[in-house]
Image (cartoon, helix red, strand yellow):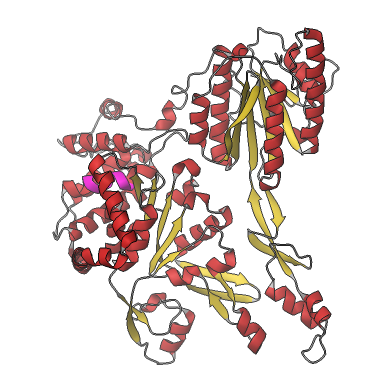
Amino acid sequence: MKLALVLNVIDPLIGGVLIMGHRGTGKSTAVRALADLLPEISIVSGCAYRCDPQNQENLCVDCRAKTESGEMLQPQRAAVSVAELPLGATEDRVCGTIAIERAFKDGVKIFEPGLLARANRGFLYIDEVNLLEDHLVDLLLDVAVTGQNRVERESISIEHPARFVLIGSGNPEEGELRPQLVDRFGLHAEVKTEDSLNRRVTIVERRESFDRDSDVFLHSFAAEQEKLRNRITRARKHFAGVKIERILLQYIAQLCSDLRVDGHRGEITIMRAARALTAFEGRKRVTEDDVKAVAVMSLRHRLRRDALEETAGGERINRALQQVFANGPMRDRSGDRSDRLTGNKAPNENGKQAHDSGDVRNRSSMPSADPGSHSKTDLPLPPAVEEDKPPHLRLRSDLGKKDRSGKSEFSSRQVYGARRLVTNQRRGRYSSATSIKSADSKIALDATLRAMLAKSVSASKASAGAISDAFRFKLFKRKQGSLFIFAIDTSGSMALNRIARARAVMLKLLRQSYLDRDSVAIVAFRGKSAKVRLPPSRSILRARRVLDSLNIGGSTPLSAGLVCTLELVTRTRNKHGEIVVLLFTDGHANVSLRNNGNDERALRQQMIEAELAQLGASLKKARASVAVVDTQSGFNSDVDTRRVADMLGACLVRL
């Protein structure tokens, strides 16, 4: 982790660092400590965007106007900034907005720069980056591509440079990042809890020493810190003179080709990181060891892998490294693309045409590193599960089915899972204004000023009531994914084949929830009770662990499972766009909520049916869509599950 941060200080074009790992392992501490380690840079005196006086191409509007008028830009030395983007930040705080005080006091529109301006030529740090709102992710992606922040809001149009090194940290169990954002990070560092007993003791001792007297603690490491700072400064100075031979670039390209890394950012990142490491160690020529040292952190997050895979593929990269450097780059294996398209054969070492059979033989010797090719064999499905159905619950394949009365079982409303835009006054993209105020309202300055002008309110005539009537508040729009609640029957009747079938289907649904940015919760019920095994989460790794750890056995308290599900729906109703309850069961409910020891089966079934009907009405009132998923094989009757679906007012899906 520390090496990845240092390499980005030496060469900011590497593209930043994504630090993922366990809680409490010092990720945020290391990044925040980076500010004290960075060497000073030259900035334009008084510039809010910290422009470089020597770089005329990336000046802000004000600095460019000064140079065009013949005025000299006054340089000054300043520390490199490390701006932290909090999860609750609004788009105005990130991009910038009108300076409210100047607008009210002087009646002028002055742009107040945001976090992106402060991060220019520095570092932008996002803690818990995997929990960042989607609209802020979209904004960061746009700025990362162009290096410019363009603001079009509240009658202001301004563009300023925003080139920064993006650093993100988080715990992968809290949720996954969008693939587009992951690819923007140059390096990926994994941090795990320390296993060495002596090192764990050292961590405790240092923490206790810092808490007792932080000044003394920092002074004890001042000499080591200064030594590292000087080493980084020398590396930045000599970085431009570091050379890398073409044969090493061929090794790097061969490595990325064998691992089937999409795009070419992998090769570029390895090359830049290897050069930065060489400069950091005081050498002028990149070696094989330098490439091997940075390859894993450069490619770990770029591999094609199953979304449910626990690790990020470091072992695969190391194996590919050993093979590539042992065999050398196979230059003639695939030939030039233009030759293949035109049908011409590339000459081999003897100057003869390479035969197709040789190309095929070479290709077949390549190790298959594409995890997508193993996605089905890793999770074997029982023969009864239909492979031709889509891996997500859209229920489209069953929309045309007819029940015994000739009516369709499903309506168009039951095509679940679509993300939608919701309006609120708390977070999202600012879209419009309203006169209705809530506890979380934020004043819409532009709309408020227009309303004041429309009412012709002046300072001498205005009453307090007239001014308050002119206030307008911001309305935000944000995308909201669905919440899928897996209510799973783990009773004895679900043992072996049935629970295996259900788990296989749920794993397919988890993959789709990862792509759609949906949340998943798991409720399990057996014996006489039910429990929320997984609160709503976007981490499919956590969901898979819960599914793998389910215990089977006991009676079937279907009513208790639905009560637990209803409570979860009620608690999370306002946090998700749509809530879909997927009830995985064989329909053999045999435990009532009012279990008073009465063993009369007919009476117990009557109580269960009455409870299910009431719970179905309550779920419908809570605006939750319900689907009963019959886990039985096609040889068993669906009478029980169909009866449960009818009592709940739900649709029935057979695996």
Visible residue check, residue 184: no
**What residue lies at 30% left-to-right and 29% top-to-bottom?**
367
Task: Name the image quarter holding residue 624.
Answer: top right
Residue 381 appears at what percent x and percent y? 52, 18
Task: Name the image quarter holding residue 326.
Answer: top left
Residue 234 within the magenta-colored segment of the rendering: no
Residue 506 appears at what percent x and percent y? 57, 27
Q: Main secondary structure of the magenta part?
A: helix
**What residue lies at 74% left-to-right and 76% top-to-bottom?**
448
- Span highlighted in magenta in the image: 292-298
Residue 51 appears at what percent x and percent y? 40, 77
Task: Name the image quarter holding residue 395.
Answer: top right
- From the viewer's perspective, tell me whether residue 392 is left or right of residue 562: left
- From the viewer's perspective, tell me whether residue 383 is left or right of residue 412: left
Can you say which quadrant of the picture contains the C terminus? top right
- From the viewer's perspective, tell me whether residue 541 is left or right of residue 422: left
Residue 196 appears at what percent x and percent y? 25, 40
Residues 557 and 325: in front is 557
Name the residue furthest right.
405
- From the viewer's perspective, tell me whether residue 562 is left or right of residue 372: right
Visible residue check, residue 518: yes
Q: Is residue 555 above or below residue 26?
A: above
Q: Is residue 146 above or below residue 491?
A: below
Number of callouts in the render?
Answer: 0
Residue 296 within the magenta-colored segment of the rendering: yes
Q: Is residue 615 above or below residue 23?
A: above
Q: Is residue 539 above or below residue 452?
A: above
